[in-house]
Image (spheres, rainbow, N blue to C red):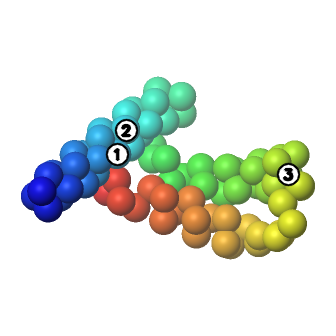
Amino acid sequence: MKAMGVFGAAEGSAQSARALRRMEEVAEILVGRQGATVEEDIPVAVEKSAGSSSMQGNPVKLSHEVLAGILEEALEPAR
């Protein structure tokens, strides 16, 4: 039973890696430059999300550094 859980985790990690590769392909197409990465737009994503209405309603204000760290950490398992 435990091996099944490990397999599921590995499968999820593989799916995450495939999704990240696809996002990087999209980044290359949109930017028009081979080698463009998802991480390049973290500052833009942080800036836009910090000003979003959903963040404005958050009782805990998160700094740009914390938001960037959360996004970087979310992308890390896929690597």
Task: Compute the Cα span from label 1 to label 3.
Answer: 27 Å
- Looking at the rendered structure, the secondary structure element under dot 2 is helix
Which mark sits nearer the N-terminus, 3 or 2? 2
Residue at the location (36% across, 59% down)?
77
43 relative to 10 in the view: left or right: right
Decide: is 14 above or below 32.
below
**x, y percentage for residue 17?**
30, 46
Q: Is residue 28 visible?
A: no
Q: Which residue is mark 1?
A: 16
Q: Amino acid at mark 2?
A: Ala
Q: Are marks 1 and 2 in contact (CB under 8 Å)?
A: yes
Q: Residue at x 34, y 45 (%)?
A: 16
**Mark 3 or mark 1, which is nearer the start of the sequence?**
1
Q: Residues within 10 Å of mark 3 (few under 14, many from 20)?
A: few
- Tell whether 41 sits left or right of 47: left
Residue 25 placement (x, y as % from top left) = 39, 33
